Image (spheres, rainbow, N blue to C red):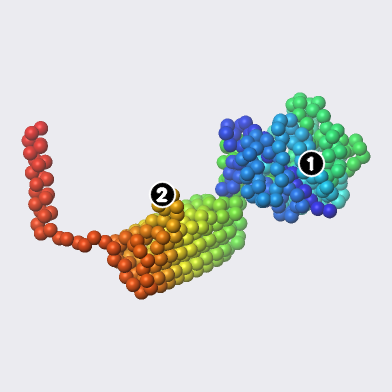
Amino acid sequence: MGTALIVLAAGLGTRMNSDLPKVLHEIGGAPLLHHAMAAGMALEPSRMIVVAGHGAEAVERAATGFDAGVVTVRQESQDGTGHAVRQARAALEGFSGDVIVLYGDTPFIRPETLEAMRRARTRADVVVLGFEAADPGRYGRLVTSGDRLERIVEFKDADAATRAITLCNSGVIAADRETLFELLDQVTNDNAAGEYYLTDIVGLAREAGLGAEVVRCDEAETLGINTRAELAAAEAAFQSRARAEAMEDGVTLVAPETVSFARDTVVGRDTVIEPNVVFGPGVTVESGARVRAFSHLEGCHVSRGATVGPFARLRPGAELAEEVHIGNFVEIKNAQIGTGAKINHLTYLGDADIGAGTNVGAGTITCNYDGVFKHRTTVGRDAFIGSNTMLVAPVTLGDGAMTATGTVVTHNVPAGDMAVGRARQDNKPGFATRFFEKLRAAKAAKSKGE
C-alpha cells in the first residue's frame, strides 16, 4: 500500500490583492505550491493530485513543471475544502492506500511531520495535524477527549468555550482513500459559510465508531500565506532557516542577514559567501568556492575552488569548472568555462565555450545574437583574448590563439595564431591644438554675441 497526496491550490487569495493565483506567489524564488509539493514528494508518493481553481491554467503549468507525473484536476466553483478534495476522486481510482491532504499556500510543513502522520495512520482511521497556537485567532479548534480527537470546530461555528481552546487545526488530514471519500459523501454545507468543510469528516468518523488522532507540530510549520505582509514574513522566515542550515553545513556567511537563498540552492562546505549575494533558482556551488560581494547567481554551477565576483552575474547555463576566476562586472550566460580560466573584468560571455587556462581581457564581448538566432563562440585552451575584443559568433579560436586589443573577430582563428582586426592608427600632427583653439574661439564669439 502506498501514499497519495492531494494538494489544494484552488483558492482565490482575495487578500493578496493580486491577479496572480495565491499559490504562485514566491518564497525563496519558488512558488508556494512548489514548497508544499516538495515536502510531500519526500514521502515518495504513488500519486500526487493538485486541485486547481482560480488561475487554473497557470497553476497547472506550475504543478506539472515541478513534476511531470503530477495529475491536476479542477474545482470549478469554490465551495470549500471538502468539495475541493472530492474533485480528486476520479484521479485516485484504482489506488489503495493512505491519502494526505496538503495546502498549496502552506509552504513550511516538514517531511518529518508528514512521515509522523503516516505512522499515526497505523493507529487511527483519521489523522489530523494540529498545533498549539500562541494566538489562536480564527483558526479551527481541535476538540479532544484524552488522546482522542472528537471533532474540529471552525471559528465561525465555535462558542466561547470552544474558542478558548489553543490546540488548532492546520487543515492537513490523512486517511485511507476509501474512508476519506465515504466520509466526504456525508459532509453537508449546513454551516455559517455554506461550504463543505473537509474537517467535518472527523466528527463523522467518530459517529461511525472510527478512531481519530492528532499529530502535533510546531506552529511555524503551519504558517499559511493570505496577505502580502504574511508573504514577506514567510520569506524572512525561510531565509533565516536557509542561512542557519548553510552555516550548520560548513558554509561561511560573512554577513548572513544580507544573503538571499532560493529553495533549491546547494552550497558545499568551506565555501565563503560575502555580503549581499543573491541566489536565484537552480544554483549549485561546490566546496571551497568563494562568491564575492554583490553577485547574483541563477541557474548555474560553480565548481570547487572557483571565485565569483564581486559584482558578477551568472545566468542560467553558466558552468564554471574548478579554479575559474570570474571578476567584477562580468556576466556569464549559457557558457562553459574551463578549468583555471580567468575572466576578471567588465566582460559578457554568452553562448560560449572557453577552454582551460584561457585569459579573457577586460571589455570582451561575445556578439551571440543577430536579432533572430543565437550563435556560439568556441575558444580553445590557453588562449589569450585581448581587452575590448568583440567575438562575432559563430566563431572558433584554437588552442593558444590570441587576439590583439580592440579586435573585432569575424573569422575563425587557428591554434597559435593572433587575430588583429582594427582600424590602423593615423596621427595628425598638431590637429588637437588647432581643433580646440577653433572651438574656444567659436565659444568666445558666441558669448559676446549674447
Q: Amino acid at mark 1?
A: Ala
For the residue carrying disc 2, how many other residues have a C-alpha within 10 Å: few (<14), some (14-19), or many (20+)?
A: few
Task: Report the front residue among 162 and 50.
Answer: 50
The residue labelled by disc 1 is 90
Position above or below: 342 against 80: below
Helix, strand or loop status at disc 1: helix
Quadrant in the rendering for residue 400: bottom left
Position above or below: 209 against 407: above
> Residue 273: x and y, percent?
50, 59
Task: Report the front residue among 438 and 276.
Answer: 438
**Res. 141 visible in picture:** no
Q: Quadrant of the C terminus?
A: top left
For the residue carrying disc 1, how many other residues have a C-alpha within 10 Å: few (<14), some (14-19), or many (20+)?
A: few
> Residue 195: x and y, percent?
76, 29
Quadrant in the rendering for residue 431: bottom left
Residue at 87% from the left image edge and 35% from the top image edge:
204
Residue at 7% from the left image edge and 35% from the top image edge:
448
Which of discs 1 and 2 lies nearer the camera? The answer is 2
Q: Amino acid at mark 2?
A: Gly
Residue at 77% from the left image edge and 48% from the top image edge:
4
Q: Are marks 1 and 2 in contact (CB under 8 Å)?
A: no
Horizontal side of 350 relative to 68 (left or right) equals left
Helix, strand or loop status at disc 2: loop
Quadrant in the rendering for residue 131: top right
The residue labelled by disc 2 is 371
Task: Report the front residue among 157 and 21.
Answer: 21
Horizontal side of 418 relative to 3 (left or right) equals left
Q: Looking at the image, tell me whether mark 1 or mark 2 is earlier in sequence order.
A: 1
